[in-house]
Amino acid sequence: MDTNLTLLTEMRNEQSENLHEFSTFEIIQLMNEEDKKVAFVVEKALPQISIAVSKMVEVIENGGKIVYFGAGTSGRLGVLDASECPPTFGVSPELFKGIIAGGDEALRNAIENAEDNVEAGKQDVQLHVTEKDLVVGIASSGYTPYVLGAVEFAKERGIPTIGISCNESTKLSSLVDIAIELPVGPEVLTGSTRLKAGTAQKMVLNMLSTATMIRTGKVYKNLMINVQATNQKLKNRSIRIIQEITGTDEQTAKKTSEHAKGDTRVAILMLLFQVDYITAKQTIDKHNDNFVKAFNELKEKTVKINFD
């Protein structure tokens, strides 16, 4: 850390920050230095994150869904992560749901007192969660009433719960089955949890959803085989994925993709194991859209046929 940044950090520790007197470069330098701490905080929580992923996989494999609950920035991050799962992993919009205090209007506008409404949290669990599901409460402070209400109501009904907070030994952590604590420390802008706290929560949500999708067979190798080809860019990506996994040429990949009705997974299985569309699709459906399990079944059958 250079002398200038050391001075800025000391000023923070003395709580005598006058950010308005800093140069633009000094401000962003300080923010960058604080942001560097976030990954190390998340690293310390990896054991709990791993346990959380295992539970999420279990719930999904048993026909349940994952529902995020949060207010303000935390709620928006939950909605963001949930909304990105369908195009990335080709899953139903119902598999991951993000619920924010105050409803969808709160995504763009601050809804007064929404985060303080315990009963609204309980009501939203009633509306959106079944006993087969899992609830993830996201609250930077660990004390947001709306989130606590949602988690408490879920717990009363035997629904598994995960809590993500940016403090230690919080009320949220005491309520949930799996507590993920991310004590990132004071923000550069006091109380602005859209900064380090938001970054830490986003990193953890990325891990939770991505690792869960990998473990449930929505990814093969490091490729998004379930990608939804909703525009030309994604259609081209789908063709490249088919080519990379099967080793076929572009023309064959395109033709097979058409026969597979645009389903990248089906096209891959058709080419790799020389099966028709119905066989490939039924095998994937049989394994609840787990491509890896479908792949292994067809591979085993192929080996057996070749051996016989």
Image (cartoon, rainbow, N blue to C red):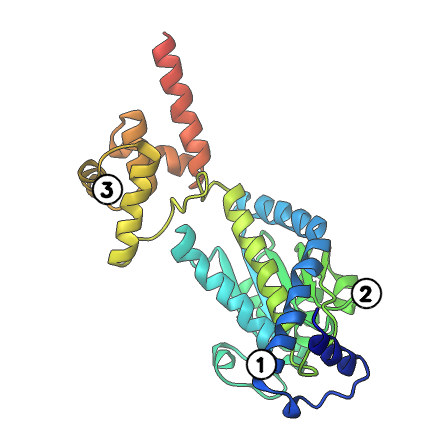
Q: Residue furthest top?
A: 308
Residue 47 visible (yes or no)? yes
Specify which label sits upstream in the sequence, 1 or 3.
1
Number of other residues with Cα within 10 Å of mark 2, as a class: few under 14, some 14 to 19, many 20 or more: few
User: Which label was assigned to residue 25?
Assistant: 1
Q: Is residue 271 found left or right of 292 in the rendered image?
A: left
> Which of disc 2 and disc 1 is earlier in sequence?
1
Q: Nearer the viewer, residue 272 or 95?
A: 272
Residue 169's mark? 2
Question: x, y (%) of residue 294?
Answer: 41, 32
Is residue 261 placed above or below 148 in the rendered structure? above
Q: Position of residue 179 (x, y in %)?
A: 73, 58
Q: CA distance from mark 1 to mark 3?
A: 50 Å
| Residue at left offset 23%, top offset 44% | 261
Q: Tell me if residue 263 can be seen.
A: no
Marking on residue 257: 3
Q: Amino acid at mark 3?
A: Ser
Height in image: 113 above or below 181?
Answer: below
What amino acid type is highlighted by mark number 1?
Answer: Phe
Q: What distance separates the C-alpha of mark 3 from that of mark 2?
A: 51 Å
Verify CB contact (< 8 Å) between mark 3 and mark 2.
no
Disc 2 residue type (three-letter): Ser
Splitting the image into 4 quarters, where does residue 281 fall? top left
Q: Is residue 280 left or right of residue 8?
A: left
Residue depicted at x 38% and y 47%: 226
